[in-house]
Amino acid sequence: MEEEAEAEEQQRFSYQQRLKAAVHYTVGCLCEEVALDKEMQFSKQTIAAISELTFRQCENFAKDLEMFARHARRTTINTEDVKLLARRSNSLLKYITDKSEEIAQINVERKARKKKKSEDGNHNSRELAEAGVVESEK
Amino acid sequence: MEGVGAGAGFRKELVSRLLHAHFKDDKTKVSGDSLQLMAELLKIFVVEAAVRAVRQAQAEDAILVDVDQLEKVLPQLLLDF
């Protein structure tokens, strides 16, 4: 019994380690870009510290987002909840609000393109089918 | 924000896993748009931390950005987020 609990604990721990590693990789890439841009190097400890920080901040973000959605009587977190997260700094809030509109716009365009493609596809296959019928009657 | 454009970023799947790891309720879900927006937010968080630490290092005439500089910019960073 205890062995099972221990094994589960181990699994949870190694999952968390994998998540942290993935965060660390992305943080490393972003810091590399900043380093190139500002012509200033980061120590490995600094990158590790930012990575740890980001991972822990995610916990706060996740819990807040969940509570915001629940407060609005929803189970699905939406972009309004994310904007609430960004409320503490005016420039951050503006940036996030602008980004959210940009994302919405891109997704609207993507859906419109997909819809047009599938409509064209149906139109073409209908034409082909009719052409096929005419052919076989000959 | 500052020249870090379409380069590195957080993948939607990673963001989703990071958030779900800390939800209290199993039923909580995240919309696709929100995941994209959260990816942006996390990216800004990292970049802000990095850039502010660089500025601190430059102000101190340091040759590289070390944890000491990061520690100095941490309080304001956390207040802003």
Image (tube, coloured by chain):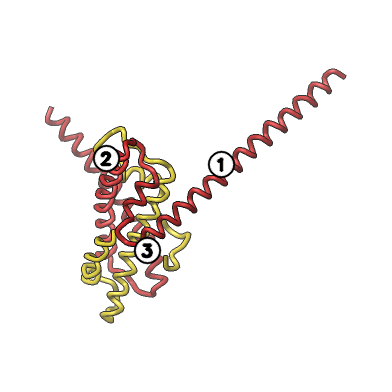
Find the distance from the CA under tag 3 to the CA under tag 1.
Answer: 30 Å
Of badges 3 and 1, the one in the foreground is 3
Q: Chain of mark 1?
A: A
Q: Which mark is residue A91?
A: 3
Neighbour tally class for label 3: few under 14, some 14-19, many 20 plus, Cα within 10 Å:
few
Name the spot of residue A116 as percent of width and height, x first: 64, 39
Q: Amino acid at mark 3?
A: Ser
Q: Residue at x 56, y 45 (%)?
A: A110
Label drawn at residue B23: 2
Instruction: Give the answer, above or below, for where B72 lies relative to A95.
Output: below
- CA–CA distance between discs 2 and 3? 28 Å
Q: Chain of mark 3?
A: A
Q: Which chain is red?
A: A
- Sequence-wise first label, 3 or 1: 3
Q: Which residue is mark 1?
A: A111
Residue at x 35% of width, y 46% of height: A81
Quarter of the figure with the C terminus of chain B: bottom left
